[in-house]
Amino acid sequence: MSFERDFVRDHTAVVSPPLVPEIRLHLATEVTPLWQATEATLQQTQLPPPYWAFAWAGGQALARHLLDHPALVSGRRVLDFGAGSGVVAIAAAKAGARVTAAEPDRFALAALALNAALNKVDIVVENGDVLATDGGWDTVLAGDMCYERPLAERLIPWLAARARGGALVLLGDPGRAYLPTGGLHALARYWVPTPLDLEDREARETTVWQLTG
């Protein structure tokens, strides 16, 4: 993991996302140089973008909501699915939750460790396929996870099953294509600044949803 941590440190800057200035993260300032560096390091081409290096709109909105409403997660066993940079997991930990961050990407795991230490919070990391388990979490969080059909087709039924079992399931989403059309209750909306090299606009209205099953 030391190589991955060095890579994260060398290719990112420590900054605070605009909607959650209380949190500091190792983030990339531009997508293309980091993408090229990742492909060169792994000696592979046509890799997906390094999602872990950016605080996406859905994650920022969900993190903001948790920091403003800590009672939602305080004292609860929380899973942050697809944790990426860790912005949601860190916000939940700051709000008093016992947090597990699910993330398979090894560079994301390194970023998570660095970001957790930077923000002085403890986060347990799970790099297996949590969608193949029933889990034992009181709360499941997912920031900006409905951008791709294959993932959404596995994730949403799993989340709905958790909600029917009594878990609090919260989604942060800026209008991605595969957000479910039913079973959602809007808790809050935020305007999140977004860089043009990642999005098609400079800000996105982003909703924090509760999935009701």
Image (spheres, rainbow, N blue to C red):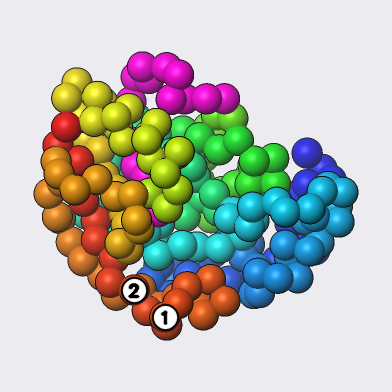
Image x and y of residue 114, in percent: 65, 51
Name which quarter of the figure residue 25 lies in. bottom right
Say above or below: 112 vs 127. below
Task: Determine which residue is flagged by label 2.
Answer: 204
Task: Determine which residue is flagged by label 1.
Answer: 201
Q: Nearer the viewer, residue 23 or 82?
A: 82
- Residue range highlighted in magenta: 128-144
The secondary element bearing badge 2 is classed as: strand
Quarter of the image with the N terminus in it: top right
- Residue in the image at 87% along x and 49% along y: 43
- Residue in the image at 59% along x and 54% along y: 52
- Residue in the image at 59% along x and 30% along y: 127
Q: Nearer the viewer, residue 93 or 40?
A: 40
Image x and y of residue 113, in percent: 63, 45
Residue 176 is left or right of residue 46, and the answer is: left
Name which quarter of the figure residue 211 lies in. top left
- Residue in the image at 37% along x and 45% along y: 142
Residue type at tag 1: Arg
Say above or below: 123 vs 162. below
* Label 1 Cα neighbours within 10 Å, binned few <14 / some 14-19 / many ≥20: few
* Label 2 Cα neighbours within 10 Å, binned few <14 / some 14-19 / many ≥20: some
